[in-house]
Amino acid sequence: MSFAKTSRKLHRIAALVCFLPLGLVTGTGLLLQVKKQLPWVQPPTLKGTGTTPAVDLEGLLAAARSRPEAGIQSFDDLDRIEVQPSRGLAKLRGKNRFEVQVDTGTGEVLQVAYRRSDLIESLHDGSFFGEASKLGIFLTSGLCLLFLWASGLHLWLLPHLNRWRARRQRPSSH
């Protein structure tokens, strides 16, 4: 079997193997590209007062606790706290994916919203499905995509190279 036929056959097989994972990566990648523009993906970051935090960690937790819909009662319920002094803001992200934005100057809750961007990111990189899937399926799909790119380029160039060779081998009409 010729290299071109083998390349075409492997190109089709690789496309089938990575069809679903790459579809998921592409869809989630598009959502992550516009996460700041779509509040459904990531709540907009608001602005608090001042630039020097006047509220300590206990005060931030108390503010989050005051909003039952966030489901945050203790530090054990938190995934992370992000402090942005230049915006006068702290974001408390719960393990349940709720985010509470607190004004670090006053301790006032500015917003409570569900944050989907972390979930979308874990789907995007395959970690949502576990380490074995991340490395076994998503890494393999990435390698298949690299092969698809190279074999697609080869399949696209092949007719052009053949025509160029044929023209070069024709006797000149001078």
Image (cartoon, helix red, strand yellow):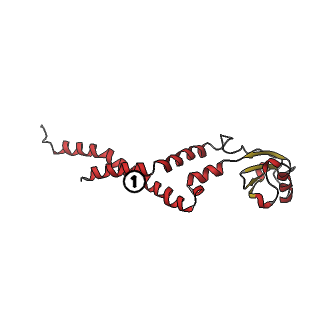
Q: In the structure shown, which secondary structural element does the residue marked by tag 1 occupy? A: helix
- In the rendered view, would you say 2 is above or below 173? below
Q: Position of residue 139 (x, y in %)?
A: 49, 58
Q: Residue at x 81, y 49 (%)?
A: 102
For the point 46% across and 54% down, the residue is: 141
Which of the two residues, 149 or 120, is positioned nearer the viewer here?
120
Q: Residue furthest top?
A: 173
Left or right: where 173 falls relative to 73? left
| Whole-percent x, y for residue 80 in the image | 73, 58
Residue 7 point in image, percent of width and height: 31, 51
Say which amino acid is labelled 1: Phe
Q: Is residue 32 visible?
A: yes
User: Horizontal and vertical percent for residue 10?
Assistant: 34, 52
> What residue sits 51% from the left and 61% below the top?
135
User: Residue beneath label 1, please?
Assistant: 147
Q: Residues within 10 Å of mark 1 (few under 14, many from 20)?
A: some
Residue 104 visible here: no
Quadrant of the rendering where the C terminus is positioned: top left
Rendered image quadrant of residue 95: bottom right
Q: Nearer the viewer, residue 126 or 61?
A: 126
- Total marks shown come to 1
Left or right of residue 127, residue 171 in this image: left
User: Is residue 164 toward the left or the right of residue 50 in the image?
Assistant: left
